Image (cartoon, coloured by chain):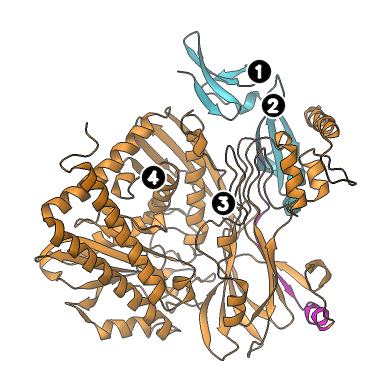
Chain colours: A cyan, B orange
Amino acid sequence: MNHPFREKLAVVTDSGAQWIRCAQCSQSLCKLGDSWKKRCTRRTFPPTHAGPLLSQLVGHYLLEKLYCPSCGALLDSELVETNSAG
Amino acid sequence: MALIRNVDPITFEVLSHRLHQITREMGITLERTGGTVTTTQQHDYNASLYRPDGDIMAAGETYGQHVVCAGFAVKRIRERFSADEIYPDDIFLLNDPYLAAIHNSDVYVIAPIHFRNELVGWSATFVHVSDVGAMTPGGDSPDATEVFQEGIRFPGIKLVERGRLRRDVFDAFTHMTRQPDAVGLDLKCEIAANNVAKARVQAMYEQYGPEMMNAVSTEMIHYTETVLRSRLREIPDGSWSETLTIEADGPRRLRLTLRKEGDQLTFDFTGTDKQVSKGINLPYHGTAGFCFGAILSSLAYDLPKNHGVLRPMSVIAPEGTLVNVKYPGPISMSTTSSGFGVGFLASSVLMQMLATSEKWRNEIVAPNASHRNCRHSGVNQYGRYSAFINMAHGALDGNGARINKDGVDSGGSYMSCPNVEWMELHYPLLYLFRRHAKDSAGAGTFRGGAGVESAHTLYDAPEGKIRGVAYGVAGLRNSGHGIFGGYPGAPSMMVLMEKTRVQEVMGKNQSPVDISELGGNSKLLPYCNFEVAQGDVLYMRVASGGGYGDPLEREPELVRQDFENGLITRESARSVYGAVIDEADGKVDLAATRELRKTLREGELKEPE
């Protein structure tokens, strides 16, 4: 069954398996159930990248953004603790 | 299978709505007869109807968690009293968080409803009373390490017996508090609301008969359960996770995994940190109640609100953790800390689940991890003591963005907030400002709602000070979380600025609207007691909504409108949204915007050096 997975990602059945794909460029990221985040292009920024009032988070958190490795579509933005940023 | 069995659909609709209208009338009764602003203006109450076994028959309009917990309270009363000890016109009181309440301040008043001497249902209310005799005025006690320090606990006792107020019980409860008159009025408004419920339900039984009434309430629950399960079957199976960190003498983590299989939801909090010696621990029934509330507002908001919402869900909450406190752990601040944290987690995983359904993804709202808030106590300008002045600024949170529209600015997450003039009229406070915080809304294709910031100083305070309690979701990860590329809202915070120049500035007839010019010693407030003295300023910023989707895809004209409306700065329009607003004519330069957005994205994607 094909269905959305989240904004800009879709689940598509192909060759008997379900895959998570970029809905913008159809790049296949991984099988459903595997970590799609690991297949993304990952960049981190100071929290203030998201606005000046996040300055208090500087030193504690980073803004991690995940992009489609093929077309660069922004798939996720999340604050991660500084010591856990990968 | 028929959605409605044994009752004709029109009668079903009429009676179902009439039962829900009774809960509304109960609420109006609480508002009109309550003893404190918390009840009369801030809507910190609930009023619902229950089946004879305690299952939810018709939930009131306010708090989902309290609908569930009051149901637990009915079941505890039924366990504590045998059927022949429960008389018509009895009314019970229960506020024990180890049985059904979420913290001692939430006082449940519960009444059996009889028709021709048969128990046919229950009504229940709660209001947040202004004091329960805890170590800190108002109840929330940051220094408590056990529940014994958090005030009086009644495990279920008759407040009214066969229609007569038990003065001994009433006095025993109110005399344990710092404000017996106000608490007494709140107890009496609950009695009044339950009396209204009883009269209205009995009138329906008289008009339609027990057989029809029983059939309708049975079918209401069946209908809600059936529709909700069918909705769940439309959504693909899967599991989704979320975590939240609360700062309480170190980081404390709540973890939730939602598993959806067929038409069943399992909220699994395995992995949540152990309970702590601070009152942010939540009882199990509270955890279940906040999950119920999250389903209610996402998948069941248009259905009759009743036990049918609970049936497709189960909750796993390991004992001895922040989401299932073990006796006698402290709980007094649980509602607004771990409670709102659980509500956020449950909402977040449900939103991730909805995103997998073409049909249901339009219901997505970026979730909100709540805010900081405070309560004051002290003597006001008329010499009257108040144990509990809830600033209620959570009612001014910005809401999360949706898939196709911005979040509501200061739309509120719960309760209502009195206006500034009312607060200043009744309490020894002067608001320096209360306004939308610029650049607070989480950016996105659709942005979150802007939250509110405010600053207060003492004014005409006979004692030259008032006491405060800082509570809520402490730490830097509260407020709105972005979703699907959207950014988080600005964190909610409370700052006490001691010994400022505020008097001097006002003495010069200047408006102290820029707190950075007031000087003083600023400290960020964790969970704590504090004092606001003459010359101090308390600054508060509530939660702002998280954004939805990529901010660089936001319609440039919407960015311009936000700039024009003072919600963002020109610099943020440029750096966060990549929108170039012409300084001369105030219009968006579309060509420059396209170019800037391309440059910004390419810069982001460049390999770090």
Q: Chain of mark 2?
A: A
- Distance in Å between CA atoms under marks 3 and 4: 24 Å
Q: Position of residue B147 (x, y in %)?
A: 42, 69
Q: Quadrant of residue B198?
A: bottom left
Pointer 3 local density, CA inside 10 Å: few below 14, some 14–19, many at least 20: many
Q: Are marks 3 and 4 on the same chain?
A: yes
Q: Please give the residue where the numbered disc 2 appears in the rendered image.
A: A73
Q: Please give the residue where the numbered disc 4 appears in the rendered image.
A: B302
Pointer 1 local density, CA inside 10 Å: few below 14, some 14–19, many at least 20: some
- Closer mark to the observer between disc 3 and disc 4: 4
- Distance in Å between CA atoms under marks 2 and 4: 35 Å
Label whose residue precedes the other's in the sequence (1 or 2):
1
Q: Position of residue B420 (x, y in %)?
A: 62, 73
Q: Please give the residue where the numbered disc 3 appears in the rendered image.
A: B369
Q: Position of residue B469 (x, y in %)?
A: 57, 72
Vertical relation: B129 (above or below) B97: below
Q: What numbered label is drawn on residue A25?
A: 1
Residue B486 in magenta? yes
Report the magenta residues as a range.
B483-507
Q: Quadrant of residue B517?
A: bottom right
Q: Chain of mark 1?
A: A
Position of the C terminus of chain B, as image quadrant, is top right
Say left or right for B205 vs B362: left
Secondary structure under badge 2? loop
Residue ID at (52%, 42%): B348
Q: Are marks 1 and 2 in contact (CB under 8 Å)?
A: yes
Vertical relation: B386 (above or below) B282: below
Q: Are marks 3 and 4 in contact (CB under 8 Å)?
A: no
The amino acid type of the residue labelled 1 equals Cys
